[in-house]
Image (tube, rainbow, N blue to C red):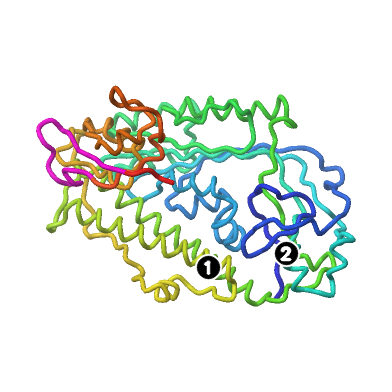
Amino acid sequence: MGLTQVVVPMIKSYDFGIGVDYSTGSPMNRAVQGEITGVKNAGGSTASWSITRITTTEELESALGISAEASYGVPAFQGASARFDFAKRSKVQSSSLFLMLSAFVKLEYLSIDEPELTDAAKQLISEPKAFNGRYGNMFVRGVDRGGLFFAVMRIDALSKQDAMSIAASLGGSYSAFSAEGKMKLDELHQKYASELHVETYHEGGPVDLDISSPNSTSDLYDMLRKWLTSFRDDPTANSVPYSATLAPMTIAKAPPAPNEADIQHASDVLAICAKTRSRILDSWNLVNFITENAYRCEFTDGLSAADFIKASNGYESDLDVVAGCASQAMRQVTKAVMPADFAKQQGKSFPLGSIPSPIPTMKSGMAMPLAAPNFVGMTVAAATELAERFGVTLGYSDKIMSLSAITLMDGYTLQFPDSKIKVTSQSPQAGDKLPSDNTVAVDGEGIN
């Protein structure tokens, strides 16, 4: 079976007729030409939005077009970093309730109906290896234009049972933007003492759209309305190409890739890596949520926050293995192997991550923490936000102070932004009792 057509997120340098290496998604030289047209008598546009409940990272990635199923794993590791970063920031896990708002504006789809090789590309038809090295094995045939808008609302309740009760009360439609939906959500917040956290992401729309985290569903609705209105007022100025259709180069009469079987196998490996990474992220997010909220967790069977920190480190190691495995599959298709085999090649154990059992229950009420939250692995910006939320004071080391972009004390100059400094250690450690002044000392290093 030869290579098949796929739809991938748009990345820099993609354009009609540009060659693409299927294994990496990298743009090559322009290989194909032909008239660019739309579907006859179908030049209109469509706009839609919906709110659905999600329970896994894979569901979010699928909606974003970066899942293994969406395009055989290729964009999940190459060219869609902004979408993946958003999925990672959303921190989907089973202890909280997650609602996903997705909106699309789709303008007329354009494509090359009758692709043919350029004169320069034709000169290499008799040299498949040279052709593949210069032009790749796929080309950009079509482009989706318009925009997309995503928001993930995380509702943190005092227990998983409370989260399920909120979900049941909202009903299957999750119409949080209706007057009735807003009122119901506000009532549920009060009843279950829940917290709302929102992450947003968009492609296309006004450049001055405020994408800082909204504080309420009303703020989110205003943001969405501004985004949709921009397309109504000026669709040309606010639209972007957000996905590309890649077609096999052979439909333009190019020579078959010399290693199609290896490419297909590497694609299978990438798909497995994408699925594995999504599952690891779900578990990693859960144990991190527990360590960040250790002060209100009821640990049993001798477990403590330290056990979940250990599990978090194991999952982080597993993510590194999967990333390395995917990188090898993209860069050296003949050496593509599954994650477990790749780990053996590297002399690493896989998988290391395992969720301790039983999962702790949440204490009633939102009292100040008696145990230190986990700040290790966070940026200083994220750690500061978490400390403020829990009423904890961070004691920054001299190294962090010298790196910080914010003048935390007189005499320190601007160098690194707080989002580029990572906390590497803390005292007391996560889960240990806080001192009387609720201060946690932290040390860190700059992120390159």
Residue at 75% x, 59% y: name it: 19
User: Where residue 193 sits: x, y (%)?
Assistant: 28, 33
Q: Secondary structure at mark 1?
A: helix
Of 102 and 137, the residue lying toward us: 137
Q: Secondary structure at mark 2?
A: loop
Amino acid type of the residue tagged 1 in the rendering: Gln
Residue at 54% x, 73% y: name it: 336
How far is the residue under mark 2 from the one under mark 1? 18 Å
Q: Is residue 430 magenta?
A: yes
Residue at 77% x, 42% y: name it: 108
Q: In the image, 88: left or right of 262? A: left
Q: Quadrant of the N terminus?
A: bottom right
User: Where residue 420 sits: x, y (%)?
Assistant: 41, 40
Badge 1, how many Cα within 10 Å: few under 14, some, many 20+?
A: some
Residue at 33% x, 31% y: name it: 189
The dot on residue 328 is: 1
The dot on residue 136 is: 2
Q: Is residue 439 above or below residue 15?
A: above
Q: Is residue 317 above or below residue 94?
A: below
The residue lying furthest to the left in this view is: 436
Of 196 and 86, the residue lying toward us: 86
Q: In the image, 317: left or right of 14? A: left
Q: Quadrant of residue 89?
A: top left
Q: In the image, 14: left or right of 169? A: right
Labels 2 & 1 near each other (Cβ < 8 A): no
Say which label, 2 or 1, has the lower sequence index. Answer: 2
> From which residue to which does the magenta span run?
426-444
